[in-house]
Image (cartoon, grey):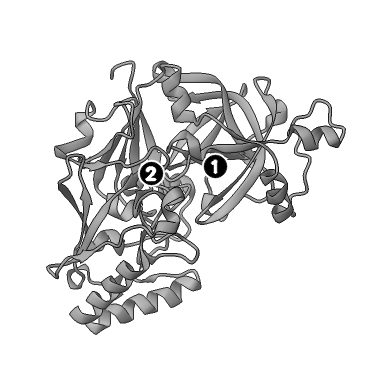
Amino acid sequence: MPRNLLQLPTTLAYARGGYSVALDLGSQECRVNVLLDTGSSTLAVAAQGYAPERDTALTATAYAQQISYGGGRLAGPVLRSRIGLGDRDQHRGLDDVAFACVQGTPPTFFRDADGICGLAFRRLDAAHDLSAPLAAQGRDPAVTWPWPFADSDAAALHDLFEQQPRVELEPLFTALQSHNVFADCFALQIGRAVVHITDAAATTRQLEGDPLNRGVLVLGGGEECQSLYDGAFADLRVLHDVYYNVNLLSLQVGDDAAIPAPALAAEYQAGAVSNAIIDTGSSFLMLEATLYDAVIAAFRARDPRLAELVARFEQAFADGQGLPNSAIDPADWPTLHLRLEAPDGSETCLRCEPDDYWPRNGFYAGQRVFLLLRQIAGWANQSVLGLPLLCGRYCVFDRRDGGTGRIRLAKARAD
């Protein structure tokens, strides 16, 4: 493999609903598994998975972060230390990388992962300079490590942070690019959307050994790794350098008429930018509310039992269960066709198969889970195109043209 490329194994075994990769953090090279998330930009590691007091490469700062996700919130000091990737002759490292050390209970979506690695653009990696309130407390030096705040007072912490100057940090992948470790491109080979479990008592190591739970992260390129994909690429236009914003044109259920995707409402345009994003940190295909309702209506028109099964699943999932594998016959369910804008203004059509939005042995042994989700309350009228749409694909996030770049998708090559 060329020196400017690095191919790393990823797994669903830790985060369960997303792929993680192993990093080495600090002077002690603490091995941490972090969720790969194109819907955020912050590198954050739980304090339980890392011992900053033993890290001789650590530098404390006056900065702190409090980041909200669709599935929770984290807060902690911004530290700087050494990050390593890869093993032996493939090892790459970078000093003085900024990351948040999560204080208190980590977000539930971490599950067995140690943290999260955001792969979006730098404007999402915001921190606040707390020099003034720290100095007022008499802290000398005025730094946020050790953490000087009560873990339980998240609302008061948020208010305090918002009153302090906002600063942009350099996300890990951006730092690797700016220091010429890698070109400004990465790729992900994705199999399933959620962890495959056939034994409820399986250990994380056993889940790692399941081929269905494996993926690949390529740093510094994409198309060069021809062993990871088959056939030609289909391209998506990226509209903005914050999230990986795309333009969803329509959604078609089976061979029904296409349903136009609503434009993003005016009140959300400044922050959300477009009517859809590509988000590898989402286990679900979250559809804008009217699109989701139209899909369920199309299921019902096809066979009323399909909508009834969705309702049954929602009740079961609220209690931490799916539906028995035998309750769902993929042959009864239609393929979803999502059409998105290509860089040249044409359409790129991506298929989402029933086995991708109703995966077998997903999260729970012997059960299927339904991975279509209605737009959550308080969210912009924006679809979050998560892992179900990317199943079985090799996805290249190419930012090398100096602008917003493009996303390239090909069929992932099976082992």
| One can see residue 153 in this view | yes
Image x and y of residue 174, in percent:
45, 27
Residue depicted at 48% across the width and 34% down the height: 122
Give the secondary structure at mark 1: strand
Residue depicted at 49% across the width and 37% down the height: 123
Q: Earlier in the sequence, mark 1 or mark 2?
A: 1
Q: Is residue 258 above or below residue 407?
A: below
Left or right, residue 319 beside residue 183: right
How far apart in space, not on screen, are marks 1 and 2 (Cα)? 21 Å
Q: Which mark is residue 115?
A: 1
Residue ID for mark 2:
209
| One can see residue 87 in this view | no
Image x and y of residue 406, in percent:
27, 37
Q: Disc 1 vs disc 2: which is toward the camera?
A: 1
Callout 1–callout 2 Cβ contact below 8 Å: no
Residue depicted at 70% across the width and 55% down the height: 155
Q: Residues within 10 Å of mark 1 (few under 14, many from 20)?
A: many
As drawn, the residue found furthest toward the bottom would be 304
Image x and y of residue 169, in percent:
55, 31
